[in-house]
Image (cartoon, grey):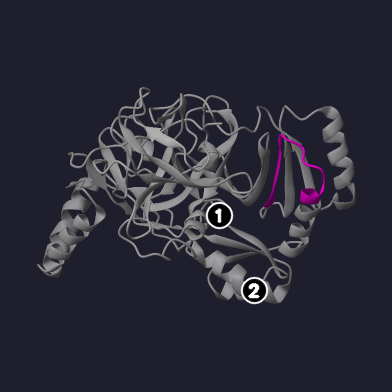
């Protein structure tokens, strides 16, 4: 079993943390807060403080303000005082999670998925085109006692682990996709999807197996969908940047969890750079190979060949592509393994950060801004440049800010990455 879409930094469109030998002249782009609004982690913090018995999740509104679903007036007042927007709902997160546990305890039906939708205050249950009329009827009967809490919907396409096509990372005729470069402080690894292959799987840059990349050393699938490929080829770059096309790179500096309603970006070798919104967290998907839980559900399209690729926003890693339905012509649903959970389980982090920095945060909404710094062999060399720049004092930053401001004024400000890069990758 394989997943498609290696995002090699050396040659593939769409981007990867892996693939190029040391050196190169790609431009590194740093993320900036394009919205100027409140941090999106306010809603998550309020949910944690008030508890699952008084809240039912949170999301980011169209105007960028965090919204928290609450079940009582006192909780609504607390949310408003903190600077977020409160929405009164009928069911708490505890009640909605009870419904998902009932679904999980039933016999597994491949082609179904569910997640808590905080906006509708319901558990959304999806059935793809592979689910028979009989199986769907049985699921509806099981959900009947929870009718007020559950919304059943059929969807086109099928939920699959995107397994076809790829830029080259090969093993025995199969291919897979790299997500992010990570490290345990001593060794470099590729974090990718778990359905790529079991421990011991060797990976190469060519079908003949002449140029080694590394070996899968740990896998978790089904249940979760992440794996770790250890670099065996010392000539390959292990820095913390992603290629996003047109010789542009994004430096990844941290990992966090997204919020519902947040705009995010996925890079893939088949369909290039795409954006969409997060529609749910902690989703469960019943793939033909088994069930995977705790996934990020999005409207970002994906196609065969995009599997394993990175989900990110600005400089923040969010997830690796697990699977979904549809394509980039008619749209669909795509699921991602959160990187915070994967990194915590594997004991790794983004190069240049400390072990333990991967989890616990929530990503800011960000957009790519123009940069002029060339990619280095590793993230620490970039940090050294920044430290030397700081030594010149605040005057340098004022000048730099003026230059950036002038450059931005020359063109309209847009939110999507596609505004900055060619759409024809």
Q: Residues within 10 Å of mark 2 (few under 14, many from 20)?
A: some
Residue 83 visible in the displayed image = yes
| Occupied quadrant, residue 333 | top right
Let me know if residue 378 is in the magenta part.
no
| Residue 23 position (above or below residue 402) | above
x and y percentages locating residue 296 in the rendered image? 57, 48
Which numbered mark, 2 or 1, is in the foreground of this view? 2
- Magenta stretch bounds: 103-116
Q: Is residue 137 left or right of residue 25?
A: right
Q: Using the image as rendered, state which of residue 182 and residue 90 is in the foreground.
A: 182
Q: Using the image as rendered, state which of residue 242 and residue 144 is in the foreground.
A: 242
For the view shown, which residue lies furthest in the front direction? 200
Q: Which residue is mark 1?
A: 61
Q: Using the image as rendered, state which of residue 1 and residue 327 is in the foreground.
A: 1
For the view shown, which residue lies furthest in the left direction? 392
What residue is at 33 percent from the left and 43 percent from the top?
232
Q: Using the image as rendered, state which of residue 258 and residue 138 is in the foreground.
A: 138
What residue is at 52 percent from the left and 58 percent from the top?
345
Let me know if residue 110 is in the magenta part.
yes
Separation (CA) of disc 2 from disc 1: 20 Å
Q: Residues within 10 Å of mark 1 (few under 14, many from 20)?
A: some
As drawn, the label of residue 50 is 2
The quadrant of the rendering that contains the C terminus is: top left
What residue is at 77 percent from the left and 55 percent from the top?
101
């Amino acid at each position: 079993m394989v997943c498609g879409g290696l995002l090699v930094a050396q040659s593939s469109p769409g981007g990867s943390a892996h693939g190029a030998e040391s050196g190169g002249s790609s431009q590194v782009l740093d993320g900036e807060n394009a919205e100027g609004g409140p941090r999106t982690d306010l809603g998550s913090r309020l949910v944690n403080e008030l508890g699952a018995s008084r809240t039912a999740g949170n999301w980011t509104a169209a105007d960028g303000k965090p919204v928290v679903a609450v079940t009582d007036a006192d909780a609504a007042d607390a949310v408003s005082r903190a600077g977020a927007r409160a929405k009164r709902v009928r069911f708490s997160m505890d009640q909605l999670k009870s419904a998902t546990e009932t679904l999980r305890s039933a016999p597994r039906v491949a082609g179904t998925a569910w997640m808590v939708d905080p906006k509708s205050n319901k558990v959304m249950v999806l059935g793809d085109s592979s689910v028979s009329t009989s199986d769907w009827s049985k699921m509806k009967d099981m959900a009947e006692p929870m009718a007020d809490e559950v919304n059943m919907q059929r969807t086109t396409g099928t939920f699959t682990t995107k397994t076809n096509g790829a830029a080259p990372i090969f093993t025995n005729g199969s291919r897979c996709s790299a997500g992010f470069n990570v490290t345990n402080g001593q060794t470099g690894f590729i974090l990718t999807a778990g359905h790529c292959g079991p421990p011991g799987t060797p990976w190469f840059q060519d079908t003949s197996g002449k140029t080694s990349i590394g070996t899968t050393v740990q896998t978790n699938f089904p249940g979760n969908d992440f794996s770790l490929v250890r670099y065996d080829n010392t000539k390959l770059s292990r820095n913390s940047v992603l290629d996003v096309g047109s010789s542009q790179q994004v430096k990844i500096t941290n990992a966090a969890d997204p919020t519902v309603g947040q705009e995010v970006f996925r890079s893939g070798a088949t369909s290039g750079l795409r954006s969409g919104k997060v529609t749910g967290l902690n989703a469960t998907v019943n793939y033909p190979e088994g069930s995977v839980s705790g996934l990020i559900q999005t409207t970002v399209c994906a196609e065969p060949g995009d599997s394993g690729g990175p989900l990110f926003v600005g400089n923040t890693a969010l997830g690796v592509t697990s699977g979904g339905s549809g394509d980039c012509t008619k749209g669909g649903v795509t699921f991602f393994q959160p990187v915070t959970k994967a990194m915590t389980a594997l004991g790794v982090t983004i190069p240049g950060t400390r072990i333990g920095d991967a989890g616990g945060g929530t990503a800011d909404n960000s957009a790519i801004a123009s940069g002029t710094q060339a990619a280095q062999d590793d993230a620490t060399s970039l940090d050294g440049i920044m430290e030397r720049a700081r030594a010149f004092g605040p005057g340098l930053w004022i000048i730099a800010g003026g230059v950036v401001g002038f450059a931005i004024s020359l063109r309209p400000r847009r939110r999507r990455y596609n505004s900055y890069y060619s759409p024809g990758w």
